[in-house]
Image (spheres, coloured by chain):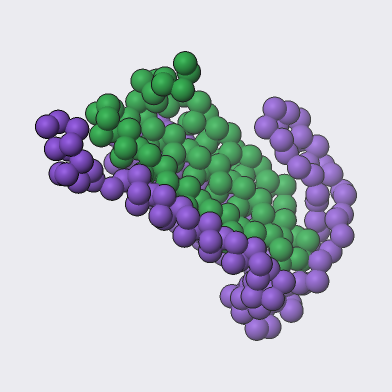
Chain colours: A purple, B green
Amino acid sequence: MVLFFFVYFSLVSIVAGVLTIAFRNPVHCGLALLTLLLHVALKTDQRYLHTRHAIVLFATAGICGELLLLLLQSPFNGAKGDAPVIAVLKDGDSFAVGIKMFSDYLLPFEIVGVFLLGAIIGAIVLAKTPSSVDAEQENP
Amino acid sequence: MVPLSAYVAVSAVLFATGLIGVLIRRNFIIVLMSVEIMLNAANINLVAFSHYLESMAGQIVALFVIAIAAGEAAVGLAIIIVVFRGRLSTNVDELNLLKW
């Protein structure tokens, strides 16, 4: 069952990703991107159904194929952290993320907040419609 | 059980899709969307490794990546609006002012 969901979400996200860059009409591209985002969100949500085994290897762009081949055979186990699935599921996923984010990751959280404020101000300033006063000064 | 390598493979394919999209498409909006695809590929990696290594760090960082992606999309769209006002086009090949 888990495998079925994984295959479905993976296939749909890949197809939607390809369609996002393949469609001519930007509206269609947007719809494909939305499908992709939805499926990625759902796929990351099913991660707590099963566990065991860890393979650590990082695939970089250029030698992707070769690395993936290595990855499928790699028996390397990484060091485990302090959040096993049983412990996380006891209080719920959101609870664990919330506790962690507002204790250990409070400073990054605040920095992201300030960053978003700057981004919003920048976006508004950039996208502001030029006022008619400016237009009269430029073309008297 | 879905092996970690499967998640990494999906993520690599999505990232390659986004990269190709950035490189071959001319429409600024679609280039932005392709960047978004690449960020999502990174998110899949982060969450998968976070699960298999039993650490919360990856999921927290994935949330931060989503926030940064939102800011990037807002600024990117604002830049598109400004450029479109000036040139009536969103074709990136016509934006060669910085090449001088």
- Where's residue B40, x and y in %? 55, 49
**Which quadrant of the rendered structure holds the N terminus of chain A?**
bottom right
- In the displayed structure, would residue B93 be above or below residue A69? above
Q: Is residue B90 visible?
A: yes
Q: Residue at x 80, y 37 (%)?
A: A70
Observer-nearest of B56 and A63: B56
Observer-nearest of A122 and A96: A122
Q: Residue at x 42, y 46 (%)?
A: B75
Q: Quadrant of residue B14?
A: top right
- Where's residue A114, x and y in %? 53, 61
Q: Residue furthest bottom?
A: A91
- Where's residue A47, x and y in %? 63, 63
- Where's residue A136, x and y in %? 14, 37
Observer-nearest of B56 and B1: B56
- In the displayed structure, would residue B59 be above or below residue A87? above
Q: Is residue A51 visible?
A: no
Observer-nearest of B69 and B25: B69
Q: Residue at x 81, y 58 (%)?
A: A53
Instruction: Give the tally of numbered discs.
Output: 0
Q: Quadrant of residue A140?
A: top left
Q: Residue furthest left?
A: A140
Instruction: Locate residue A65 relative to residue A126 in the image: left or right.
Output: right
Q: Residue at x 25, y 34 (%)?
A: B85
- In the displayed structure, would residue B39 be above or below residue A95? above
